[in-house]
Each structure stands twice: as structure tokens, then as C-alpha cells.
Amino acid sequence: MDALKILAEACADVRPAEPDDAPWAARFTAAPADAGEAAALLRAAADLGLAVVPRGGGTRLRWGAPPTRCDLLVDTRRMDRIVEHAAGDLVVTAEAGTPLAVLGAALAEHGQRLSLDGQPPGATVGGAVASGAAGPLRLLYGSPRDLVIGLTIVRADGAVARSGGKVVKNVAGYDLGRLFAGSSGTLGLIVSATFRLHPVPEARAFVSRTFAGPGEAHDAVQRVLHSPAYPAAVECSSAAGHRVDVLLEGVANGVPDRAAAVADLLGGGTVAAGPPSGWAELPAGGTLVHASVPPGSLRDLLAVPLPADAALAWSASGHARVVLPGGTAPGRVADALAALRALGSAVVRDAPPDVRDAVDVWGEIPGLALMRRVKDQFDPDHRLSPGRFAGGI
Amino acid sequence: MGTPLDRLAARFTALLGRDSVIDDPVRLRTYECDGLTTHRASPGLVVLPETAEDVAAVVRDCVAAGVPYVARGSGTGLSGGALPRTDGVLIVTARMRRILEIDIPNQRAVVEPGVINLDVTRAVRPYGYYFAPDPSSQQICSVGGNVAENSGGAHCLKYGFTAHHVLSCEVVTPDGEIVELGEGPGYDLLGVFVGAEGTLGITTKITVRLTRVPETVQTLLAAFTSIEAGGTAVSAIIGAGVVPAAIEMMDALSIEAAEAAVGCGYPEGAAAVLIVELDGPASEVAHQFAEVERLCRDAGAFEVRIAADDAERALIWTGRKSAFAAVGRISPAYLVQDGVIPRTALPRVLARIDALSAASGVRVANVFHAGDGNLHPLVLFDDAEEGAAERAEEVSGAILDLCVEHGGSITGEHGVGVDKARYMPRMFTDTDLDTMQMVRCGFDPAGLCNPGKVFPTPRLCGEVPGVKKGPHPLVAEGKAELF
Ligand SMILES: Cc1cc2nc3c(=O)[nH]c(=O)nc-3n(C[C@H](O)[C@H](O)[C@H](O)COP(=O)(O)OP(=O)(O)OC[C@H]3O[C@@H](n4cnc5c(N)ncnc54)[C@H](O)[C@@H]3O)c2cc1C
């Protein structure tokens, strides 16, 4: 009897891994049907000493370092039920493998949404929480750590644990939802999450203007942020010139007036009902860097020397994304990182292997010793997504 | 050379100076409780550090001596989170009250932990900004306490809790090291530190997010002849996609108390009043406010008052804000409960509380943040009457059971502290609690940082998590091999 049979006793859907399952080599792939099966699977993996890496839609498996070991890939996509949508309470619970698009459609039927954008097609609930990433709406609504109000996980030893709950206001116990948001599968397997929701706004408008210089774009953003416009998102992207886009959401009677006011603040912006091209999107491929750059440093960010074909998108929540096209020499990536790190932290999310090997992917990590100790508690044998995370965690 | 505390007193005196160390029993008693006065313990020693380095040195000495320590801000906590240890050191942040930086371009401010919540708003108001978390205690509570309790206020319905308004914290860890927890790479340790009730370390510097003062604020008071009608109005407002800044509700008994205390002049004959506040861009608010007014009338409001200016708005809020203290006018003693239910369960749960009250003869006044289902039942009793306190305690506990039964929480903002640690198992399994405590073991394996709070039973940090079962039986028996 081999490991595959032992795993099969725990979970009906187990097979040898195939090359398409992940961008790295794995031994087995299992797709548990529910939290119970997932728990049995992780317990069996613990008994067998297997290194376990969770996957959802597979849209961000290339983020972070490849695992140093991957014996068992846990595919969450069969756990795809919307467990409970309490529309009157603006709360939903969904299993980890639920595609965000499916969830979004179900919520939209009730005039509600999960205010988390910028997710690639195919992204799942669990993957979104584990990656912690958010799009332009982060300015007003935050990221997964702010939207998750309850989380159920399976620990490395196969125990099922829950934190938070089904109500938005709740301070009972530690908030593991915030700890797991962005933890990249290194602390446990997320099996379901409960989110707070918002009503779909009745109306929205995008106000845009392109500025010639970094200083002008910077000043325009400052004027909008310090105005009473209450934007849902403020973006600045650099390609041909520096384009500032402001998203306003609200009631049909109010949004046009606010859009006009913001157009004035931009010194003559154009107003559109739909998103401008490239909204919340960046070119794929190459090296993707996430940097934290607060609004007061936008001018400096826009002045960072980047290769001509690089793309940069900044959100007023203080997060910038930079894509350096494939083929950019590792030395130039390192230069860009150094310039970004002079403004805040910067992390390489995805990069070709030669770049990844040549640059400091994470930069300085304040609190790393504490992080290691928390990791050691949750995963003493370092079997969960080993090596994927900051500091080699 | 005396007890460990005597030795620490000498060390701290050398380190911080004589007037920063309190060991006189009479003065120590000033610190014997926080806002929850039913739990009292005189601290072994009190220190009043002025810098992060001082705090770190104190913590290191405590750890070296194996002496527990507890942080205290303004001592307004309502769950006994800052309850001292008679065998320990109380670290009070009252001398760390500087606002270090106001950074308007980045919409943030950097403050020391002892800074009073409202002082942050006062300092940034001239720039058109404020600090959004607004606990009712905001004139006296500290930002460090807000961080520890993840405090909220009436306006967190729209703006969220302290966790959403803290960008980073400088923390003295239980090792006595100073680290910055924030948005850098790696785990969101800040996210779990906020709301950990002072059990993961002491914050010595906090970077808070500042919020733009809204263009307009509009407030109305709607009076109903039944609490159900008020509940219906709340559901209708939320159901219409309106996100008010606040929706507060009071029942007849709490209105009576507020009337007796501050003469707030709420409509006569109201079995419930609702305060609804909208804020934001003027054009939006005007439109939605009309809708809210209509929804209140549709739900049966017999009177709707609209505040014409700030003075009238303050008047509407006076009754609500005085409600806790006002109950003292109609009852010699009372317990403040803090539970949460899904908003839609409001009518059912209130009916059950009514029934509980009727069956036990214990009066319950209800004041709550109706928008997010956060109940603050005030359980009234006469402390001169034998057994009354126990009966009140029982009713209060039964209300928490109702909250949990309806899918809610045992605390929405006051925290677990010492008060509710015993109720945690009603909401969480042993495994849930054990898992939360893994974080604590990571931060504080010695368990000296605010011990005995939040969790009913401490986890021994040396333990390997879960049940260690050894290799799979088939492997052990040699019937299976790995790979
Ligand atoms: C009349 C009244 C009304 C209230 N209304 C509200 C309300 O509307 N909403 C609400 O959420 N709360 C409310 N509270 C509760 C209380 O005011 C809040 O919990 C407040 O945040 C506590 O702040 P504090 O400075 O008084 O903290 P303390 O009571 O001194 O301490 C509270 C906890 O924080 C820890 N702590 C303090 N400072 C630090 C630090 N620097 N680092 C780490 N841990 C620390 C303590 O150890 C303790 O566990 C109210 C209290 C009263 C008395």
C-alpha cells in the first residue's frame, strides 16, 4: 500500500499530479469535496509527512517563490458552494474554491457585491484571501483582510478551526482572518470564508485626465483626495503621460454633480460611464512588483526611472504595481527595486527564474522573527507551502 | 533583597526615576480596575514610562524576573482587559501623549499610545480631517486602548473599526524588542495585533489613517409605537442600499432613563426611537435622506424630526449618548451587556429578551447600534437586594446565549477581557481557541503579557499543536512505504 492509497482513503479524488496542475513539479493532486474531506486529507498528509500546497483557480500560483517541496497539491475547486447568503445582513459565506465571478453573479441578483476588484478571471475565494490582493476599490473598501469577517481553515495537523463569525461587528478572540489574508497557503488551508458585502451602487462615473509631468499628476491627485468628493478609487497609470482616473460611486442623482466637481479638480477631466481601457489591469508576463507608496510620494514614484516599455499603476490606497517586461536584465530590475524601496516596501510577486535568482525578492521584512515563530506554531514541520513566502517561510 | 517586585521597583526607579514608579499601596489602588468595576485587583507595581525604550526595558526586566505585566491606557475598558495582577507590573501609557506627526498629504498621523482618541481629531480638524473610530468614551480613552480593543463607535457602520484605521504600530514584543508591524512584506501581524486586547505586546507608537470630514451630515430622529416597527425601518433602510453613517435605536425604558437624566425631549409615547445619520457629498446625502425619512414613515414612524443644524443634531444625540449613565437614574445598579446578532434577527431576539425579562422579573433597557446588530442591553438591579446581582448576571449571560444561538457574537466592541473569557467556549470550539492561541504562543511563549485575558484556558506553548499521532499505522507496521 502506498501513499496514494492512504490519501485515497481520506479523499475520493486523488491522483498522481500532472504537469498542468502547477507551475512546479508535484507528486499528487487531490480535490477534496468539502471541509471534512480536506481535513482528513491534511491529517493523512501529516501522517505521511507530505509537503502540501493549496491551489485555487491557479491564477496566482506564480506569485511568491516556487515551493521548495510539493508532495501534495490540494485543489480547492470542488469546494465551490455558496454556503449562505444572508442578503438582509449583507453577509455571504462561500467555500474556498468558489470562483469570485460565480459569487459575484449570485450576489448581483440581490443588488449586492463583494467590494473586491482587480481579480483575474478564474480567481477563487480562497485564492483571493490567501493572496491578499485587491484592486482600485481598496481605497474605500480595503483588501481581503478588511472584508473577511469569518474564516474556516484546516490546520497542518488536519484540525478544522474557525475564527470570526457571521456578523460584521465582532471582537471575540483573535482575528485569524486578517492573519491568513495574504499568507499564501503557509499557515493552513482556507476552506471557507465569510465576507461583509456592500450594495451595488446605483450609479458610477469615471473621470480621467492625462498629465504631462509627474508633478501635475501628483498635485491633481492631492486635490481630489483632500476634496469632499469621496472617491471609491483614484488611480494613476504611466504609459504615454501620467493618467489619473477617479471612480465615483453613489446615487444616480448625486454622481453627475460629483463627477463634474472632480473634473474641475483635475483641471478639465473627461467623464465616462464605463471604465477607461486598462482599468485595474496590467500587461501579463515579465516581472511584477508590488510596492507600497503613499499618496505624498506619488511624484517621486512617477519619477522613478523605468525601462521605456515598463507599465506602472498606482492606487491612492498607497499600492503600486510595476510590470517590467520579460527580457529586462536582472540588473535593471534590481535598480528599479532599489528606487521603489527608497519610497516604501517593494516585493517581487512574479518573475522569470533568472530575475528571481538575481534580485532580493522580498526586501527588508520588519518583524520576520515573529513571523517565523507564528509559522512554527501553525506548521512546526514546515510542510505547508514551504519556501513560498517572505523570508523563506 | 525582598520579593521580585521589590527588586523590580528598585530597578525601575533607577531606570525611570522615582516619580515614574508607584509602589505605595494607597496610590496603587487607583489602578485596581478599569471601566468594569466588578473585577478588582491592586497591581503589584505601576510604572509610567515615557518612551518605547523605557517600555522595552521594563518588559525585559519583567520577563527576566518571570513577572507578569499588563498595559493600561485610560482604563475605560469594559471587559477588564486592563485588570492588573497583584503579582505583576502595570505599565501605564498616560505619559506617552504626544502627537508626533500630522501628515496631511498622506492622510495619516503618528501618535503615542496614551493620546486621547478625540485629541487626534481635534489636532487634524483644522485640515478638514478626523480620526474615524468614535467610541462613546472618545473624550477619555486612549488610542493604544482603541488598538488593543479594536474599538468602534456609532459610525463604524459606515467607516469600520480601529483595525481599518491603523496603518502601522510600533510594538514592544513580549521579548522586549521594538518592532514595527505594518504593511511590509510577510504576515499581517498588525491585523492580528489589533484587537488582541494587549496580549501580544504593547504598542508604543501608532500610525493612524485620517478621514476627510464629510461635506454634509444629516440626522433624523424617528419615533415608533413599537420596537418591531423600528426594526422594520432599519431593515428597509439597509435593504434600499443606503449605507448610513449610523443607525441607533433605544427602547422605552432607556428613553425614560435618558429623559430623566438629560431631558432630551424625545417624542412622547415612543416605544422606540431611531437615530439615523447620513454623511457624505451633499448631493448624495440630500437624495438618500429623503428616502430614509420616507422609509421610516412607511414603517410606522409617528414622528420624524430632522436636525436643522449642529445644535439640533447634538440634541438628538444627547439622549443616546447619555443612555448608559442615565440608567443610573432609574436603577441603583446595572450591568452593561455587549452582544451582536445578525441585523435581521433583531425583532426575534428583542422579543426573546422581553420574555427573559418578564420571566425573571429583571428589567432590561435596550440601547443599540441597530445598523450592525450590536446590542447593549442594560440589565437593571438593586444591589441592596440579596441575590439581585446574581439574577441580573444570569439574565445578562442568557442574552449572550441568545446572540450566539442566532449566529452572532458575545462581544461587538467591549472585548472579552476577564469578563467574557468563560463565554468564549459558547462561540468557539476548543480547537478554535487552541488555534488562536498558537498566535499567542508565537508572540509570548512565556505567557507573561496580560495573562488570563481572552482565553478561558491558557495553551501550553511547548506543546506540539494538535495530537501528535506518529507515523501512519500502515507505515509503522511496515505495510506501507512513502513514495
Ligand atoms: C462610558 C463608556 C463608553 C464606552 N463606549 C465604547 C464604544 O462606544 N465603543 C467601544 O468600542 N468601546 C467603548 N468603551 C470601552 C473602552 O472605552 C474602549 O475599549 C477603549 O478603547 C479603551 O481604551 P483605554 O485607553 O481606556 O484602554 P484601557 O481600558 O486602559 O485598556 C484596554 C485594553 O487595552 C490594553 N492596552 C492599553 N494600552 C495598550 C497599549 N499601548 N498596547 C497594548 N495594549 C494596550 C489593556 O491591556 C487592556 O487590555 C466605552 C467605555 C466607557 C467607560
Image (cartoon, helix red, strand yellow):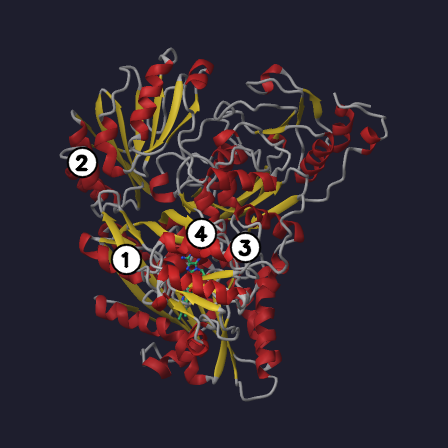
What element does badge 2 sit on? helix
Chain hosting mark 1: B
Q: Give the x, y percent position of residue A239.
A: 26, 21
Between marks 3 and 2, how big is the CA–CA gap? 43 Å
Residue type highlighted by circle 2: Ala
Q: Give the x, y percent position of residue B368.
A: 44, 66
Between marks 4 and 1, how big is the CA–CA gap? 21 Å
Between marks 3 and 4, how big is the CA–CA gap? 11 Å
Between marks 2 and 1, how big is the CA–CA gap? 32 Å
Residue annotated with mark 1: B98
Residue annotated with mark 3: A173
Q: Is residue A79 above or below residue B146?
A: above
Q: Quadrant of the C terminus of chain B?
A: top right
The numbered mark, 3 or 2, whose residue comes first in the sequence reads: 3
The numbered mark, 4 or 1, whose residue comes first in the sequence reads: 1
Category of crowding for the residue at label 3, using alpha-carbon neighbours closer than 10 angstroms: few (below 14), some (14–19), many (at least 20)? many
Residue type highlighted by circle 4: Val
Q: Give the x, y percent position of residue B187.
A: 48, 39
* Label 4 residue near ligand 1, CB within 8 Å: no
Q: Left of A178 or right of it: where is A310?
A: left
Residue annotated with mark 4: B194
Report the image quarter containing ligand 1. bottom left
Q: Which mark is residue A220?
A: 2
Tell which residue pokes out farthest to the front in this image: B1
Q: Residue at x 55, y 70 (%)?
A: B351
